[in-house]
Amino acid sequence: MTDIIPANLPQNLPRSLPAQRALELVFGNYALNTRRAYERSLKDFQKWAGLHSAQDLESLDSLRMLEYKEFLRLSGKKSASINQAMSALKKICRVLTECGYLQQNPFKSSLIRNEKVSQLSNKGALRVNQLQKMLDANENIAYDERVETLLRHRNKVLLKFLYFTAARRSEASLLNWENIRQDGRFWIAILEETKSGVPQKLKIRDELYQELIAWRGALQLAGLNTPWVFPSLGQRSMGNQMTGKAINEAVRRLGHAIGLNISTHYLRHTAITLALEMGEPLQKVQAYARHASANTTVRYFHDQQLLEKNPTDTLPAL
């Protein structure tokens, strides 16, 4: 975690470890992306507040926290981003207080309320024919001639993997060949780093497994021995892990090729929505999507239904 200087405390308060180490111990079992978000939130707040000394920390109060929240809002941060940052600071302040690094918790939940966030999902579902058009466009995009064959093959398999498994881009980024295993008569992908922080597994349907095997063969034929299922094919990062940002850029480029402005999450949204539309039980789809709450799964479906079967569509024309 980012360095933070503990305040001058009475001798009876526990301070057996540096504050940084205490935070590392508390948040060590959190998911990687969650830890990064907490570190970034703390670092950004320290920079804004100019926290350099013990006295600076000790002078913090809820009004100062509210000022920071207002700063985030005025700087154009979305409500969800503001809530995420403040939630991280709330947790960090509570840990530092309970461990004795702060005499009083400066974060008062009764004063610092969450921003209201729209209940509508900000991502839509694609149609199957749009996915097919993206695959067709992949064959005609002007990729780097030095690796265009590998790029077309990788991006085709990547698109299918994200759609068939409803995986998140971070999960696809971290997937290595050792994660793909047989479980009885099924093939599965073990996700070691997930949003929940707990390893999970995804079923890989047979045709997708065959696509993955063919892709691995293409990599080996090209002399690219890499542990990553979806490696980077850049000249400076050839064979290294493909970042989540790069995965999103690959999907975005395929979308732009057919006139769509999309991100990787659209593929996940599409898979979940279509599964519900085809009559799969809610609990089964929730498990497939790995949503903590069924309400999230239902919202994906209802958002799309509201667009496709809107009551205003039946109003008489003028």
Image (cartoon, rainbow, N blue to C red):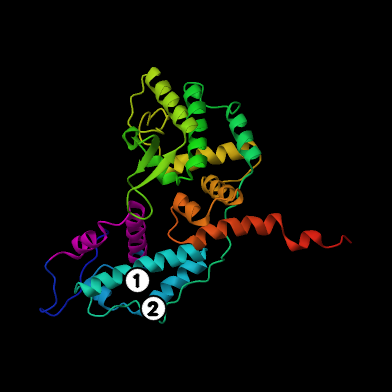
Q: In which quarter of the image is the N terminus?
A: bottom left
Q: Is residue 10 above or below residue 185?
A: below
Point out residue 266 in the picture as x, y percentages from the top left corner. 55, 47
Point out residue 205 in the picture as x, y percentages from the top left corner. 47, 36
Disc 1 to disc 2: CB gap under 8 Å: yes
Point out residue 148 in the picture as x, y percentages from the top left corner. 51, 24
Left or right of residue 272: residue 67: left
Q: Name the residue under label 1.
A: 90
Residue 143 located within the stretch drawn in magenta: no
Left or right of residue 30: residue 99: left
Residue occupying the point 51% across, 66% down: 79
From the viewer's side, name the closer residue of 197 and 285. Answer: 285
Q: Is residue 90 above or below residue 243?
A: below
Left or right of residue 228: residue 260: right
From the viewer's side, name the closer residue of 257 and 295. Answer: 295
From the viewer's side, name the closer residue of 279 and 296. Answer: 279
Residue occupying the point 70% across, 54% down: 308
Q: In this view, does 176 lie above or below 74?
A: above
Q: In this view, does 261 lie above or below 139?
A: below
Q: Residues within 10 Å of mark 2 (few under 14, many from 20)?
A: few
Disc 2, SS: loop
Q: Mark 2 points at which residue?
A: 109
Left or right of residue 267: residue 14: left
**Total of numbered circles in the picture?**
2
Point out residue 195 in the picture as x, y percentages from the top left corner. 38, 53
Q: Give the Cα distance between marks 1 and 2.
A: 8 Å
Q: How crowded is mark 1: few (under 14 residues within 10 Å), some or many (20 or more)?
A: some
Amino acid type assigned to the residue bearing label 2 in the image: Ser
Q: Give the range drawn in magenta.
A: 17-46
Q: Which residue lies furthest to the right in this view?
A: 318
Residue 1 is tagged as none
